[in-house]
Image (spheres, helix red, strand yellow):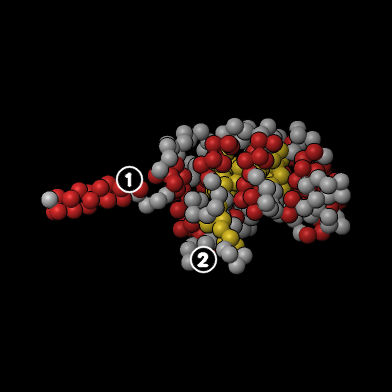
Amino acid sequence: MKMKNTLVALLSALLLLTGCGNGNQANQTPKLEKKLPIGLQMYGMRDDLAQDFYGTLVKVKEMGYEGVEFSGLHNIDPAQIRQWCDELGLVVVSNHVSVTEMVADIEGSIEMCRKLGCKYICAPWFFEDRRPGGENFARLMNELDTVSMAATEAGFTYLYHNHDFEFDRVEDGRFGLDYIFETHSDSLMKAELDLCWIKYAGQDPIAYLEKYADRTQLVHLKDYYVAEDGTFEFRPLGQGIQDVPALIQKTYETNATWLLVEQDNPTPGKSAMQCSQESMDYLREILK
């Protein structure tokens, strides 16, 4: 009798462990329907691109990504990059071009993006003097008018990509990001919401997806972790603090056309390639 009870206990424990899997939330919840294509922001792969641009694109395609967003072309002809992407079946979704670069040479910047074959041109990172509260923030607002109009007239959709610093407040009390969007025409400037930086700034990314549902065209999926001592590190999707399934589900309710995985820097002990692969593996687990 004692032997039988022991066997029953062992079998029950085994079933419990089997049901729990590895503790990953993706294995415990129903899969989401895959409604949007998934691309990779190539900024995180910048070192790989510098060493072997074409070879890196090949690996990105092999991982399962459907498109790419560039942030620096490493002095390679954009027409050549487009040809490589076309051959591999990768969509060139977007290109990050600094506002300063565009203002200095609008025609050249537009031509670069035209050769690259992207639909979107995006305003990326800014130096401190151009951020909310900076001495040149007003100047940036005027430059955004200029470049967004030029991009739109050339047939592109112009986007603004947020970081955490847009959640500093301007003089009238609004967050910088809200001020930027509320003072620029929706017809000239759309949104590329980076959900990591929204959360890191202490705001709710779900709320911002709702607030700018009509304006949002691209969404950056990015995970991260902050240790008790304040140490920050980027993580592959599903390995940080972001509720990725909830963010994806809410993105489906916006006008977004792509989900873009981004990891600015590799997790310590891992390569950028490994992190990109693990993010895609996680997405395969939670999407059907």
Could you say where residue 251 lies in the image, as x and y percent from the top left?
58, 37
> On the rendered structure, is 41 left or right of 202?
left
Could you say where residue 266 lies in the image, as x and y percent from the top left?
53, 61
Q: Establish if 261 lies above or below 51.
A: above
Q: Nearer the viewer, mark 1 or mark 2?
A: 1
Q: Secondary structure at mark 1?
A: helix
Amino acid bearing label 1: Gly
Query: From this viewpoint, is residue 114 visible?
Result: no
Residue that numbered label 1 is attached to:
19
Q: Establish if 238 lies above or below 155.
A: below
In the rendering, which numbered label is found on residue 268?
A: 2
Query: From this viewpoint, is residue 170 visible?
Result: yes
Could you say where residue 169 lies in the image, as x and y percent from the top left?
80, 50
Could you say where residue 63 lies in the image, as x and y percent from the top left?
44, 49
Q: Secondary structure at mark 2?
A: loop
Residue at point 56%, 56% (across, down): 224
Q: Establish if 155 lies above or below 270.
A: above
Residue at point 76%, 59% (across, down): 127
> On the rendered structure, is 189 left or right of 95?
right
Residue at point 87%, 46% (across, down): 172
In the rendering, which numbered label is found on residue 8?
A: none
> On the rendered structure, is 27 left or right of 210?
left
Amino acid bearing label 2: Pro
Cα separation, mark 1 vs mark 2, equals 31 Å
